[in-house]
Image: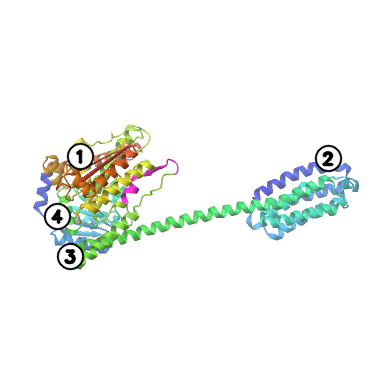
C-alpha cells in the first residue's frame, strides 16, 4: 500500500468534506469549524438516505458521519457510501459512543472514530489524517479493535464458524502480530504515536502503519464475510 | 374456560343418557324420561354453541341455563317413581346439572358459582321427601364444590392472566420509554459535547461552563451505556465492564471490548475494586492535570485490566517515599485484592513516566 501517494493528493488541493448529522446545531458547528480550518465543506445532510444521494452528486473526499442517524444505521451508510465511491474516507463521529455501533461502522470500512466532545482542533486534525488515508484511533476504538480480534479468534477456535453459521469453512479469523497487539494496547492506554514510537524504538510512521494494518485486516475480513454470506445465499454479486 | 364447561356438559350428557336409557323401564313415565333427555340434548347443543362466543355469554342465558337444570331436577318427581327417588336414585339430569353451576362459576366467580350450586342442591332436596340418602348428600357437596371452588379457580386464572397482561404492557411501555429516552439522551449529549468543546476553545468563564458540560456529558454517557453490575442469575458471572465503565470521567478514559467480559462474581468485584483503587490513586496523587486510561482485555484464559496515567510518576526504588505519600498502601491493597482471587498485579512507575498498574486474573 502506498500511503505516500495519498498524502500527495491531499497536499495538492482543497479537501472536500461532507458533514452528515441529524442535529442542525452540531452539523453547522462542525461545518463552520472545518471551513475556518480551510476545508471545503461541499455538502451537509441530515439523514442516511440524503447522505447517499448528496454524496453521489458532490463526490466529497471525506464524509464526517454521525452514527445515530434517524433512518439508517451508521455501518450501513458507511458500507453504501464506500460501495458507491471506493476512494472515499469516512470518519465516524458519535455522541454516545455505543460500542457495537462504533465497531460495526469501523469494520464496515470507516477510517476512524472521534467522540463529539473532541475539541475543534482535534476534529480538524482528525479530518486531516482521514483525508491523508490514516486511521484515526481513540483509546476507546483501540480497545474495541483489540476485543474484536480476540472475539474472532475465540469464535474460530470454538468452531462457531462465524456469522454465516452452518459451514465451518470460511475466511480464517484475522490475527494481530505481537507488535500490532503491543501498539494497539499502547494506543488504548492513551499514548500518542510519537510516544509509542519512542517507547518501542520505532519510527512514528511505522507505528502509524501498524495501527492502520489492524484496521485494514478487520475490514478485509468483514468484507470477506459479507461476500461469503452473499454467495451462500446465492445472491448475485456485481 | 368456557371450552371446559362445554366438554363437561357433553360428557355428562352422554353419561346421563346412558343412565336414563338403562333405567327407563323402571321409570314411572319412560316417555317423560326420553322427552327430558331429548330436551337436554337440545339444550346442550344450544348452550355449547351460545357459550362458545363471548357475545353469547349473556347473564340471562346463564340464569336460564340454571333454571333449566333446576326444572329438570324438579321434573324427576313427575317422571320417576317415589320409591326410586327416596331410595337415592339419581335425578333425571343427574351430574349434567353441574354444568350449569360451572357456567355460573366461570361467568361470575366463586359466589355466583356457589349460588348456582345452592339452587341446584335446593331443587335436589325439594324433589325428595325431606329424606337425605347418602348419595344425594354426596351429590350436593359435589355441586357446591363445583360452584365455589370452580369459581375461585377460574377467578384466580383470570387474575393471573390479567397480571401477565399488565406486566407485558408495562414492559412494552418501559421499552418504548427507553427508545424515546435514547433519542433524547443523544440530543442532550450532542448539546453538552458542543458546549464543552466550544467552551474550552473560548476560554475564561466559557471554559468553566464547558468543563461543567463535559462532566455532565460523561455522567450521561455512562448512564446511557450502563452495563449491568448484577451477577447473571444462571451462571453467577459479572460483566467486568459494568464495574469499570463508571470510572470514566473528563480525565479518565475507559476502553473495553464490545462484547461482555465475564468473570465469577468474586473475581469480577476484585478486579473492579483494584481498578477503582488505581483510578482513585490517579485522582489523589497524579496531580490535577493528569489523565488516566483504563483498558479492559479478555485474553481468553486471563482477564487483564491496565491503568495508566500521565502524572509525574515515582521511582520504583523509592518505595519508602512512596509509602509516605500513601502510594504503597494503594499498590499493596491492589496486589492483595488480586492475590485473594488467584490473580496478580504489578505497579510500575518512573519519574516523569507516569504510573502503570497491570492487573490479571485467570478465568
Check residue B234 for magenta coloring. yes
How far separated are the C-alphas under marks 4 and 1?
33 Å
In this rendering, is residue B109 above or below B256?
Answer: below
How far separated are the C-alphas under marks 3 and 4?
29 Å
In this rendering, is residue B15 above or below A94?
Answer: above
Q: Nearer the viewer, mark 3 or mark 4?
A: 3
Confirm whether residue B235 shows in the render: yes
SS of the residue at dot 2?
helix
**Disc on the earlier residue, 4 or 1:** 4
Q: Chain of mark 3?
A: B
Please report the bounds of the magenta region as a residue range: B233-245
How far separated are the C-alphas under marks 2 and 4?
102 Å
Q: Is residue B362 left or right of residue B348?
A: right
Residue at coordinates 53% horizontally, 54% vertically from top-left? B165
The colour mode here is rainbow
Give how far across and how far down residue A201 sits, in percent. Answer: 11, 40
User: Dot 3 corresponds to which residue?
Assistant: B203
Q: Are marks 2 and 4 on the same chain?
A: no
Residues under numbered marks 3 and 1 in contact, where contact means CB atoms less than 8 Å apart: no
How far separated are the C-alphas under marks 3 and 1?
37 Å
In the rendering, which numbered label is found on residue A182? 1
Amino acid at each position: 500500500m502506498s500511503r505516500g501517494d495519498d498524502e500527495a493528493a491531499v497536499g495538492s488541493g482543497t479537501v472536500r468534506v461532507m458533514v452528515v448529522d441529524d442535529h442542525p446545531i452540531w452539523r453547522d458547528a462542525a461545518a463552520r469549524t472545518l471551513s475556518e480550518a480551510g476545508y471545503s465543506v461541499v455538502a451537509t445532510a441530515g439523514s442516511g438516505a440524503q447522505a447517499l444521494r448528496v454524496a453521489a452528486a458532490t463526490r466529497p473526499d471525506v464524509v464526517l458521519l454521525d452514527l445515530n442517524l434517524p433512518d439508517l444505521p451508521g455501518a450501513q451508510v458507511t458500507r453504501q457510501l464506500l460501495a458507491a465511491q471506493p476512494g472515499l474516507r469516512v470518519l465516524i463521529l458519535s455522541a454516545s459512543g455505543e460500542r457495537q455501533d462504533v465497531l460495526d461502522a469501523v469494520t464496515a470500512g470507516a477510517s476512524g472514530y472521534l467522540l463529539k466532545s473532541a475539541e475543534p482542533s482535534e476534529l480538524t486534525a482528525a479530518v486531516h489524517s482521514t483525508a491523508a488515508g490514516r486511521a484515526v484511533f481513540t483509546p476507546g476504538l483501540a480497545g474495541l479493535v483489540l476485543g474484536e480480534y480476540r472475539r474472532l479468534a475465540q469464535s474460530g477456535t470454538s468452531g462457531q464458524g462465524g456469522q454465516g453459521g452452518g459451514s465451518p469453512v470460511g475466511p480464517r479469523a484475522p490475527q494481530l502480530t505481537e507488535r500490532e497487539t503491543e501498539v494497539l494496547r499502547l494506543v488504548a492506554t492513551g499514548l500518542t504515536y510519537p510516544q509509542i514510537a519512542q517507547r518501542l524504538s520505532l519510527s512514528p510512521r511505522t507505528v502509524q502503519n501498524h495501527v492502520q494494518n489492524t484496521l485494514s485486516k478487520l475490514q478485509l475480513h468483514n468484507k470477506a464475510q459479507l461476500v461469503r454470506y452473499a454467495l451462500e445465499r446465492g445472491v448475485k454479486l456485481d | 374456560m368456557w371450552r371446559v364447561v362445554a366438554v363437561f356438559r357433553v360428557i355428562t350428557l352422554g353419561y346421563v343418557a346412558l343412565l336414563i336409557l338403562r333405567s327407563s323401564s323402571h321409570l314411572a313415565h319412560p316417555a317423560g324420561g326420553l322427552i327430558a333427555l331429548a330436551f337436554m340434548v337440545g339444550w346442550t347443543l344450544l348452550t355449547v354453541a351460545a357459550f362458545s362466543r363471548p357475545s353469547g355469554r349473556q347473564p340471562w342465558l346463564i340464569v336460564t341455563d340454571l333454571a333449566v337444570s333446576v326444572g329438570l331436577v324438579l321434573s324427576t318427581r313427575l317422571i320417576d317413581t317415589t320409591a326410586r327417588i327416596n331410595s337415592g336414585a339419581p335425578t333425571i339430569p343427574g351430574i349434567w346439572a353441574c354444568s350449569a353451576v360451572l357456567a355460573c362459576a366461570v361467568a361470575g366467580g366463586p359466589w355466583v358459582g356457589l349460588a348456582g350450586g345452592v339452587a341446584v342442591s335446593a331443587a335436589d332436596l325439594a324433589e325428595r321427601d325431606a329424606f337425605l340418602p347418602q348419595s344425594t348428600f354426596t351429590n350436593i357437596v359435589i355441586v357446591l364444590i363445583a360452584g365455589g371452588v370452580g369459581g375461585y379457580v377460574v377467578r384466580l386464572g383470570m387474575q393471573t392472566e390479567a397480571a401477565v397482561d399488565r406486566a407485558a404492557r408495562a414492559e412494552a411501555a418501559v421499552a418504548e420509554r427507553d427508545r424515546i429516552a435514547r433519542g433524547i439522551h443523544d440530543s442532550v449529549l450532542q448539546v453538552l459535547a458542543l458546549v464543552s468543546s466550544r467552551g474550552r476553545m473560548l476560554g475564561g468563564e466559557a471554559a468553566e461552563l464547558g468543563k461543567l458540560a463535559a462532566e455532565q456529558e460523561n455522567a450521561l454517557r455512562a448512564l446511557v451505556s450502563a452495563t449491568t453490575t448484577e451477577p447473571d442469575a444462571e451462571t453467577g458471572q459479572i460483566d467486568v465492564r459494568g464495574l469499570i465503565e463508571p470510572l470514566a470521567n473528563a480525565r479518565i478514559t475507559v476502553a473495553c471490548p464490545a462484547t461482555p467480559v465475564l468473570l465469577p462474581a468474586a473475581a469480577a468485584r476484585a478486579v473492579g475494586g483494584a481498578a477503582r483503587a488505581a483510578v482513585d490513586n490517579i485522582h489523589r496523587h497524579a496531580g490535577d492535570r493528569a489523565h488516566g486510561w483504563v483498558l479492559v482485555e479478555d485474553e481468553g484464559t486471563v482477564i487483564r485490566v491496565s491503568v495508566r496515567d500521565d502524572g509525574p510518576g515515582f521511582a520504583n526504588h523509592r518505595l519508602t517515599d512512596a509509602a509516605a505519600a500513601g502510594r504503597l498502601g494503594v499498590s499493596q491493597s491492589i496486589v492483595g485484592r488480586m492475590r485473594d482471587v488467584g490473580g496478580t498485579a504489578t505497579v510500575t512507575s518512573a519519574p516523569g513516566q507516569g504510573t502503570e498498574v497491570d492487573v490479571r486474573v485467570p478465568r
